[in-house]
Amino acid sequence: MRLRDRRSFAKPEVMIIPMIDIMFFLLVFFMISTLYMVNLKTVDVNMPQAQHAQTQMNVTYLVTMKKDGTLYLEDKPIEEAALIKSAKEENRQNSHFAIVVRADEGIDYGKVVELLDHFRAAGISRFGLAADSVGGKS
């Protein structure tokens, strides 16, 4: 005994549009979440603002100088002698080695110049100073 006619059954369809929507949502979610993870390896300092600050992505060392003169490599405190020694070794191994110094706005300018002079004495010629852009963070 047949209850339904064979021709009345619809063929199953794969609904791909909702699957594409979910994939785009996941893509956007992971893109935005990774953008917020970039600044996790830095120490908070009040950097000076600059009208024409540029973002550089090819930085090997990110050195932070707090107002009291303490130094941080990424997010770990480090002594100046150890920093210079490791930077000199890294510069010897990597031809594209670059250092960016993030100094607190209220720090003595002489301390920043002294650190840059120590880098130059160690043979490091590619370094820069970080600043916040006027519209937001750089």
Image (tube, helix red, strand yellow):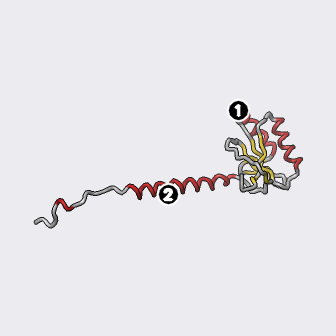
Question: Residue at coordinates 24% horizontally, 60% vertically from top-left?
Answer: 10
Foreground pick, 111 / 53 = 53
Foreground pick, 117 / 52 = 52
Q: Looking at the picture, how far across and down is residue 46, in whole percent?
A: 79, 57
Foreground pick, 123 / 49 = 49
Task: Examine the rendered structure and indicate whether residue 114 appears above or below residue 10.
Answer: above
The amino acid at mark 1 is: Ser
Q: Which mark is residue 136?
A: none
Question: Residue at coordinates 48% horizontally, 55% vertically from top-left?
Answer: 24
Q: Looking at the picture, how far across and down is residue 102, in whole percent?
A: 77, 49
Task: Examine the rendered structure and indicate whether residue 103 appears above or below residue 127.
Answer: below
Disc 2 packing (10 Å; few <14; some 14–19; many ≥20): few
Foreground pick, 27 / 110 = 27
Question: Residue at coordinates 73% horizontally, 39% vertically from top-left?
Answer: 98
Q: Which mark is residue 95?
A: 1
**Between discs 1 and 2, the one toward the N terminus:** 2
Question: Residue at coordinates 80% horizontally, 47% vertically from top-left?
Answer: 79
The amino acid at mark 2 is: Phe
Task: Examine the rendered structure and indicate whether residue 80 appears above or below residue 137.
Answer: above
Q: Quadrant of residue 5?
A: bottom left
Report how far apart the C-alphas of labels 1 and 2 lie in the structure: 40 Å
Numbered disc in front, either 1 or 2: 2
Q: Looking at the picture, how far across and down is residue 50, in whole percent?
A: 78, 51
Quadrant of the frame with the N terminus: bottom left
Q: Secondary structure at mark 2?
A: helix
Q: Secondary structure at mark 1?
A: loop
Q: Looking at the picture, how far across and down is residue 134, in whole percent?
A: 76, 55
Q: Which mark is residue 25?
A: 2
Disc 1 packing (10 Å; few <14; some 14–19; many ≥20): few
